[in-house]
Amino acid sequence: MTKYTVATYIQAFIAAALTFSAAATAAAGGPDLANLDIGQWLAVIGAALISGGAVFKTPGVTTPATPPAAPADNKVVTTIEEIAEAAAQVLGNVKPKA
């Protein structure tokens, strides 16, 4: 069983509260919640529970670490260095105007 921190519980509560208020307002078509029927209230409560519970979801598959440098990255760096060297050969010791 994974142990969760207090911050995780707070995040779950905030997610549920925000979803509850947003879903209730959307279902009512405005801030007056008096015209919601039982089905709409159950949908609002369900959305809030799912949103709050999603905070506790742990990924089932771990993602591998990013490789240190892909071959394309090395080619881009090499190309930039070659352009800089060619520009230095063509321009020589030209200093930009300050």
Image: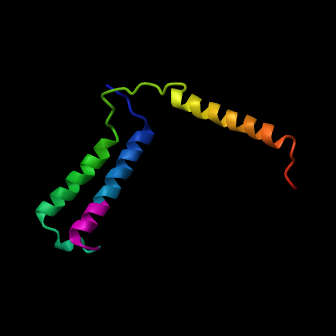
Residue 70 visible in this rendered orientation of the protein: no
Position of residue 4 relative to residue 14, above or below, is: above
Question: Percent from the top left, x then y, of residue 82?
Answer: 68, 33
**Residue 60 placement, left or right of 88:** left
Q: If the image is split into quadrants, where does the C terminus sit? A: bottom right
Position of residue 9 relative to residue 19, above or below, is: above
Question: Percent from the top left, x then y, of residue 93?
Answer: 87, 41
The residue most toward the front is: 90
The residue sitting at 87% across, 47% down in the picture is 95
The answer to which of 80 and 17 lies nearer the viewer is 80
Residue 78 visible in this rendered orientation of the protein: yes
The residue sitting at 86% across, 46% down in the picture is 94
The residue sitting at 21% across, 67% down in the picture is 27
The residue sitting at 20% across, 52% down in the picture is 46
Question: Percent from the top left, x then y, of residue 48?
Answer: 27, 52
**Which stretch did the figure color magenta?**
21-30
User: Does the magenta portion include 24?
Assistant: yes
The answer to which of 55 and 59 lies nearer the viewer is 59
